[in-house]
């Protein structure tokens, strides 16, 4: 009698595809802050935020709206809380530039947490155009900063797929040809949720934007 045993070969599970999300600020209510001196920001055509900027003067006023946002819109950038900055730097430190805010209040001195103007400075050409549902055009308006360049239009039920090889180890990036759209992966989303951050919206890019 043979002592040989029959072994079944277990199939290795296929690695799951990374999930990606459009990340931005929520629109739940009006924020209670305003920039006191917009001249500190670079011209719009430069778009990306230089790390050498002076502190941005902000007025926080509870009578104007809520102050407990961890992420809010600031022109083409974000206003983020200190704990948001901590999460972002822990997950993907090379993706961001942070400029400190000089926070003021209508009466007395501000004694709350620090705030920062945040820019996602990584831009990746990672869209899988053949697997996505987007409108692709070439800018023909000479007044636009991207004149003569390709651009993506993301509206309605448009869906996005990405080439993971082009993303690599990155956890957050702006889309080339539509750099107002910021994309993050599941790891960064989970980190934000675990930290209890408020005012951040995530939308699964495989299910359509907006």
Image (cartoon, rainbow, N blue to C red):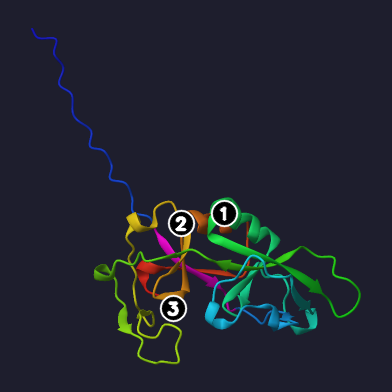
Instruction: Decide whether the magenta segment is chiefly helix, strand or loop.
Output: strand
Residue highlighted by disc 3: 210
Q: How dense is the environment of label 1, judged by Cα within 10 Å: few (below 14), some, or many (20 and up)?
A: some
Residue 29 left/right relative to 206: right
Q: Which residues are magenta?
A: 19-27
- Counting every numbered tag in the picture gives 3
Q: Are marks 2 and 3 in contact (CB under 8 Å)?
A: no
Q: How dense is the environment of label 2, judged by Cα within 10 Å: few (below 14), some, or many (20 and up)?
A: some
CA–CA distance in space, label 2 to label 3? 19 Å
Eye-nearest disc, 2 or 1 = 1
Please name the residue shown 45% across and 74% down the image. Answer: 179
Mark earlier in primary sequence (2, 3): 2
Please name the residue shown 64% across and 59% down the image. Answer: 85
- The image quarter in which residue 137 lies: bottom left
- Which residue of the protein is positioned furthest toward the right in this rendering? 108
Q: Secondary structure at mark 2?
A: helix
Residue 195 in the image: x percent, y percent?
62, 55
Q: Is residue 26 magenta?
A: yes
- Which residue of the protein is positioned furthest toward the left in this rendering? 1
CA–CA distance in space, label 2 to label 1? 16 Å
Residue highlighted by disc 1: 93
Residue 63 left/right relative to 72: right
Residue highlighted by disc 2: 186
Q: Nearer the viewer, residue 38 or 132?
A: 38
Q: Is residue 191 magenta?
A: no
- The image quarter in which residue 110 lies: bottom right
Eye-nearest disc, 1 or 3 = 1
Q: In the picture shown, does residue 168 fall above or below 1? A: below
Q: Nearer the viewer, residue 9 or 183?
A: 183
Mark earlier in primary sequence (2, 1): 1
Residue 207 in the image: x percent, y percent?
36, 70
Residue 91 in the image: x percent, y percent?
55, 52
């Amino acid at each position: 009698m043979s002592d040989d045993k029959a072994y079944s070969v277990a199939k290795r599970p296929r690695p799951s595809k990374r999930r990606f999300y459009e990340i931005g600020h929520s629109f739940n209510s009006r924020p209670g802050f305003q920039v006191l001196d917009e001249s500190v920001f670079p011209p719009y055509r430069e778009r990306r935020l230089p790390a050498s900027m002076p502190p941005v003067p902000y007025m926080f006023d509870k009578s104007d709206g809520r102050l407990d946002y961890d992420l809010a819109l600031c022109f083409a950038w974000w206003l983020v809380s200190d704990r948001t900055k901590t999460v972002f730097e822990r997950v993907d430190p090379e993706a961001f530039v942070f400029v400190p805010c000089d926070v003021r209040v209508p009466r007395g001195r501000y004694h709350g947490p620090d705030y920062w103007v945040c820019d996602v400075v990584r831009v990746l050409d990672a869209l899988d155009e053949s697997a996505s549902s987007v409108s692709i055009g070439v800018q023909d308006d000479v007044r636009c900063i991207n004149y003569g360049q390709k651009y993506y239009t993301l509206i309605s039920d448009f869906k996005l797929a990405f080439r993971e090889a082009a993303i690599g180890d990155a956890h957050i990036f702006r889309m080339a040809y539509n750099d107002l759209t910021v994309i993050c992966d599941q790891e960064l989303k989970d980190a934000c949720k675990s930290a209890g951050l408020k005012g951040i919206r995530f939308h699964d890019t495989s299910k359509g934007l907006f």
